[in-house]
Image: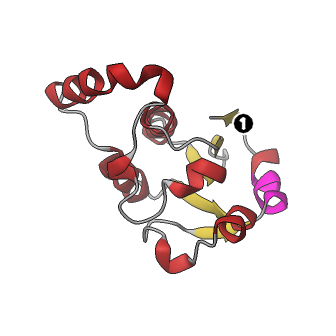
Amino acid sequence: MIEKKKLALVIQSGTIDKLYCAFILASTAVSMNWEAHLYFTFWGLMSLKKGAMEQASLPSDYKDLEDTMKQNLKKMNYPTLYEMLKRLKQSNLCKIYACTPTMQMFGTKKEDLIPEVDSMVGAATFLNIASESDVNLFI
């Protein structure tokens, strides 16, 4: 039997533009019947806190484009970030990992995170996953 291809993403940013990039890549992967492994660290991890994705915004350099971006996404009937993440999880091909050292650094507890998080792991565990992946990206 042929093994599924795997995508491993390290998501370090919690801005709306980078989260959409990550979720679009992961959605494309699962639509191609690939596994998608998403490791959230630093500011990316903060987006996994309950209610945080709804507050995601553009970086200050592009803040003036934020309203236009959000309006156009709405016109395109694009799902919200959290809706995209929930759809990814429904595929049963996507795993969400929270970085435990980042959780410690920011005092984040498991109960602070959205229920879609599969595991809380350190870098070594995720590197083992990434080492078995066909595509590895840092966002």
Answer above or below: position of 120 versus 93: below
Q: Is residue 56 visible?
A: yes
Question: Is residue 126 inside the magenta stretch?
Answer: yes
Q: Is residue 41 visible?
A: no
Residue 82 placement (x, y as % from top left): 34, 52
Answer above or below: position of 91 versus 120: above
Q: Is residue 72 left or right of residue 1?
A: left
- Quadrant, the C terminus: top right
Q: Which residue appears at 61% of the width and 61% of the height?
A: 97
Badge 1 amino acid: Asp
Answer above or below: position of 14 versus 105: above
The residue tagged 1 is 134
Q: What secondary structure is the magenta-colored segment mainly?
A: helix
Q: Which residues are magenta?
A: 123-129
86 or 28: nearer the eye? Answer: 86
Residue 131 placement (x, y as % from top left): 82, 46
